[in-house]
Image (cartoon, helix red, strand yellow):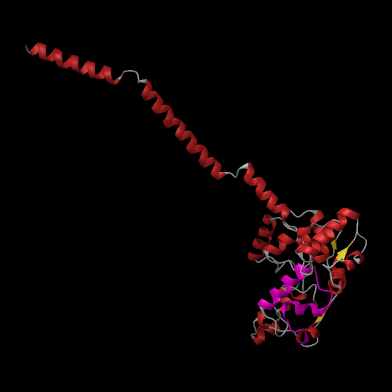
Amino acid sequence: MLTAVICIVFLAGYLISAWQRKEPSPDDIAIQADAEQEYEEFIASLEEKEQPSERQYTTYKKKEENIPVILASFNPNTTDSITFRRLGLPAWMAKNILHYRAKGGKFRKPEDFKKVYGMTEEQYSALLPYIHIPPEDTVHHIPQLYIAQNVPMKNIKYEPGTILDLNRADTTELKKIPGIGSAIARLIIGYRQRLGGFYQIEQLKDINLNIQQLRAWFSIDPANVHRINLNRISVDRLRSHPYINFYQAKAIVEYRKKKGSLTSLKPFSLYEEFTETDLERIGHYVCFE
């Protein structure tokens, strides 16, 4: 009897072991395959998140290319990243310049700007005429006079009789003029960039500034005004200028398409979209090359 019980126990153990080692059913195989596919898709999705897709790269590149280039006077020691982008520099280069300045770096002469990592000879040559480094940025130490008087550099104002070029002065210089703080300095620089430069001091009235108080501090060199080529520019770029509205921009481009290259603004004196004042102001900012 005992022998029979032992045999039954061993036989049961063998049958259970054989059942556990049996081949998986078709349903089990399908479930396993689905699980493996889901895992592979999950890994692939992580890789896509880590690396931008070609479409994302193309979209980013288009955004880079669509930023309009506006060449204007700038101080590489104070210019912000947005202005660097508008000067035609890529975002990564603008970021490197700001990082260099944050570490205490300073551009003391225009040639120093040529050393920016990635700066090409073509980029440097295009920007060189617009680089303006004020005298205080060329020194390597704070004058002892300021230390002795314990006067913060940022609170120092220019003496009466100081004259600045309105088309070249940066925010640091503008803030040294009595009555001009950070907000007004940024307002002047921003409007100057939109215009392409000032041709007369009276234009500061456009941004509600009192020119009687500021007239004595500024000179203007019309040679620093950036002109736009009416035979090549688009409607969108034209309408971005403060002195040209959408209807005027459209009229200029349509005339060019129908009658060819422009040589002057005279044809538009007969258009109802333009007044004599409009044409006089616009004339300072256009060319027909």
Magenta residue check for 204: yes
Residue pictured at 38% horizontal, 21% vertical: 26
- Most common secondary structure along the magenta stretch: helix
Residue pictured at 66% horizontal, 82% vertical: 155
Magenta residue check for 86: no
Using the image, determine if residue 274 lies above or below residue 33. below
Residue pictured at 66% horizontal, 87% vertical: 149
Q: Where is residue 262, by image quadrant?
A: bottom right
What's the magenta region? 183-212
Using the image, determine if residue 4 lies above or below residue 90. above
The reply to whether residue 222 is visible in this rendering is: yes
Q: Where is residue 201, by image quadrant?
A: bottom right
Residue pictured at 45% horizontal, 34% vertical: 38
The x and y percentages for residue 73 are: 79, 68
The reply to whether residue 125 is visible in this rendering is: no
Residue 7 lies left or right of residue 220; in this view the side is: left
Q: Quadrant of the C terminus?
A: bottom right
Q: Where is residue 2, by image quadrant?
A: top left
